[in-house]
Image (cartoon, coloured by chain):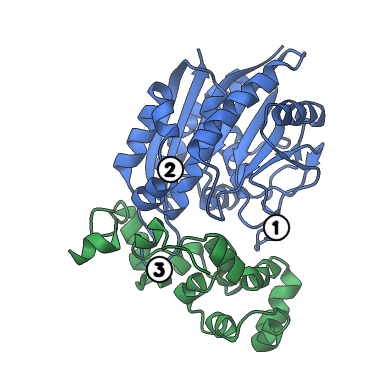
Chain colours: A blue, B green
C-alpha cells in the first residue's frame, strides 16, 4: 500500500532558486537561509521517498489567463521547466507518475473534489525551488513528482477549509493505491509577504509563528482562517499558505514535528519551513 | 449593476487581484505574458507603442505601461506576477519593482526587508482605522 509518510512546508521564493543557480549561496545575505535547510536535506536523503506530491501555484507561467484551474493535477510522465522571462532554471526535467496521478484524479473526483486534469504543463519556481531546497543540485531529481497546482493568484483562492479537506481526500486516494510506496507531500509558498502596491514589504512574524505552531497542534483552527485575515494581516500574497493546509490534511490527525526554520527575508518574503512526520 | 465594496478594499496600499480586476486587466496581462518570449521582448523594446497596439487594451493601460506607472498598472487590472515581466524586460528585479510601488529606492527597499520588513501595526491594517 502507498503511504504518505511526511509533509514538508516551505516557501518557494524565486530569488532562492536564482541564488543557487548563480552560485551565490555563500554570500552573507544567503548563508543563514541555506543553513536552515541543511537538516532538511539530510532528512530528505535519509527518508528517500519514492514519490513527492508538490502542492504549489503557477505564477502566470504554465497558465496564462485563458484558463485558471482552481485545483490542477499534473498527470504527465514528464514536466519541462518554464522560461519565466530570464530563461528556464538550469534544473533537471521533472519526472511524473502518470499511473498514480490518474488513480488520484479518479479517487478525488468521486470524492467530490472536481480536479482539473493537466496533461501538459511547464513548471515554474513555485515547484522547482522547493525541490532545490530539499535535494540540492542533482543531475536528475531522485523522486517522481505529482504536481498539484492551486490558483492563489486570482482572488479568491480556495478556502483553507476546502484545502484541508482536499488534503484528507488525497490521503485516502494515495492509501488506496496498491503498491508499496513512500510518499511525501509538499505545501509550498508563503509565509507572510506582499509584493505589490505601496504596502509591499509587509512581514508579520507573529502571524507566521502562530501558523507554524498551529500546523502540528491545531490545524482545524488554521483551516478556519478567512481569506481576508491572510490578506490583511500577512500580506496580499500570504494567501499562498492555504496550500500548506492541503499538505497538513494529507497527514492524518497526529503528526510529529521534526524540523522548523524561519528567516526574514528572502527578497520580499518571510521564509518558513517545517517538516512533519505522520505519527 | 454593482456590488457592495469588498472588505479587502479597506486594506491600505493594496489592489487585490479579484475577478473584476482580472476582467479589466485581461488584455493588459496578456501583453505582460507575451514578454516571456525573448523575441517579443526585443520587438516591444524596439517600438513600445507599436507593440502595444497588438493588444486590445485601453489607452490608459497603454500609457501606464509606457510610463512604467507600476501602481497604476495594478489599479487597471495588472497582476504583480505578470507586471514583473515588464520589469524583467527592463533588466530590473522584483525588488526594484516593489520599491517603485512603495516610492523608495531599491536600496532602501532591500534595507527595509533586511531590517524585518514592514509592520502591519504601523497603520497598514485598515484604511478606516487610519482615519480615526
Would residue A12 be found to the left or right of residue A175 on screen?
Answer: left
Q: Residue B99 carries which label?
A: 3
Please tell me which residue is depicted at 46% across the width and 68% down the height of the picture: B96
Please tell me which residue lies in front, A244 or A44: A244
**Residue A178 picture location, percent across and down:** 77, 13
Q: Mark 3 lies on which chain?
A: B
Q: Using the numbered discs, state the Cα–Cα distance from disc 2 to disc 1 in whole angstroms.
A: 24 Å
Mark 3 surroundings: few (<14), some (14-19) or many (≥20) residues within 10 A = many
Q: Mark 1 lies on which chain?
A: A
Q: Which residue lies furthest to the left in this view?
A: B132
Please tell me which residue lies in front, A1 or A90: A1
Asked if residue A206 is positioned above or below residue B99 in the image, the reply reads: above
**Residue A171 picture location, percent across and down:** 62, 21
**Residue A131 picture location, percent across and down:** 61, 37
Asked if residue B76 is positioned above or below residue A155 in the image, the reply reads: below
Q: Which mark is residue B67?
A: none
Please tell me which residue is depicted at 48% across the width and 72% down the height of the picture: B75
Q: Using the numbered discs, state the Cα–Cα distance from disc 3 to disc 2 in whole angstroms.
A: 20 Å
Q: Check if mark 2's residue and mark 1's residue have beta carbons within 8 Å.
A: no
Q: Quadrant of the N terminus of chain A?
A: top right
Quarter residue A199 falls in: bottom left
Asked if residue B68 is positioned above or below residue A274 in the image, the reply reads: below
Secondary element at image label 2: strand
Mark 1 surroundings: few (<14), some (14-19) or many (≥20) residues within 10 A = some
Tell me the residue that label 1 is attached to: A83
Amino acid at each position: 500500500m502507498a503511504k504518505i509518510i511526511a509533509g514538508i512546508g516551505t516557501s518557494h521564493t524565486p530569488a532562492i532558486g536564482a541564488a543557487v543557480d548563480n552560485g551565490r549561496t555563500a554570500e552573507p545575505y544567503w548563508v543563514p537561509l541555506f543553513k536552515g535547510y541543511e537538516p532538511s536535506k539530510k532528512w530528505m536523503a535519509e527518508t528517500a521517498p519514492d514519490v513527492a506530491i508538490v502542492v504549489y501555484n503557477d505564477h502566470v507561467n504554465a497558465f496564462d489567463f485563458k484558463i485558471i484551474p482552481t485545483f490542477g493535477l499534473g498527470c504527465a510522465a514528464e514536466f519541462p521547466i518554464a522560461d519565466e522571462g530570464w530563461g528556464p532554471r538550469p534544473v533537471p526535467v521533472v519526472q511524473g507518475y502518470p499511473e498514480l496521478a490518474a488513480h488520484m484524479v479518479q479517487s478525488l473526483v468521486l470524492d467530490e473534489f472536481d480536479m482539473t486534469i493537466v496533461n501538459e504543463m511547464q513548471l515554474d519556481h513555485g515547484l522547482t525551488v522547493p525541490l532545490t531546497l530539499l535535494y540540492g543540485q542533482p543531475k536528475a531529481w531522485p523522486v517522481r513528482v505529482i504536481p498539484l497546482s492551486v490558483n492563489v493568484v486570482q482572488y479568491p483562492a480556495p478556502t483553507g477549509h476546502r484545502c484541508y479537506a482536499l488534503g484528507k481526500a488525497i490521503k485516502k486516494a494515495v492509501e488506496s493505491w496498491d503498491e508499496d510506496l513512500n510518499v511525501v507531500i509538499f505545501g509550498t509558498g508563503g509565509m507572510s509577504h506582499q509584493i505589490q502596491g505601496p504596502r509591499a514589504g509587509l512581514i508579520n512574524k507573529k502571524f507566521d509563528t502562530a501558523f507554524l505552531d498551529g500546523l502540528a497542534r491545531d490545524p482545524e483552527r488554521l483551516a478556519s482562517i478567512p481569506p481576508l485575515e491572510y490578506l490583511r494581516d500577512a500580506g496580499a500574497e500570504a494567501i499562498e499558505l492555504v496550500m500548506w493546509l492541503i499538505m497538513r490534511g494529507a497527514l492524518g490527525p497526529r503528526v510529529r514535528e521534526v524540523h522548523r526554520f524561519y528567516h526574514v527575508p528572502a527578497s520580499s518574503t518571510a521564509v518558513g519551513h517545517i517538516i512533519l512526520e505522520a505519527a | 449593476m454593482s456590488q457592495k465594496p469588498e472588505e479587502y478594499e479597506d486594506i491600505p496600499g493594496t489592489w487585490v487581484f479579484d475577478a473584476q480586476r482580472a476582467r479589466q486587466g485581461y488584455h493588459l496581462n496578456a501583453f505582460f505574458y507575451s514578454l516571456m518570449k525573448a523575441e517579443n521582448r526585443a520587438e516591444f523594446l524596439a517600438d513600445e507603442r507599436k507593440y502595444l497596439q497588438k493588444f486590445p487594451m485601453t489607452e490608459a493601460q497603454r500609457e501606464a505601461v509606457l510610463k512604467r506607472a507600476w501602481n497604476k498598472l495594478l489599479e487597471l487590472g495588472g497582476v504583480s506576477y505578470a507586471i514583473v515581466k515588464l520589469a524583467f524586460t527592463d533588466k530590473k528585479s522584483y525588488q526594484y519593482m516593489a520599491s517603485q510601488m512603495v516610492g523608495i529606492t531599491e536600496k532602501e527597499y532591500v534595507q527595509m526587508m533586511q531590517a524585518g520588513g514592514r509592520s502591519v501595526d504601523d497603520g497598514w491594517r485598515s484604511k478606516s482605522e487610519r482615519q480615526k
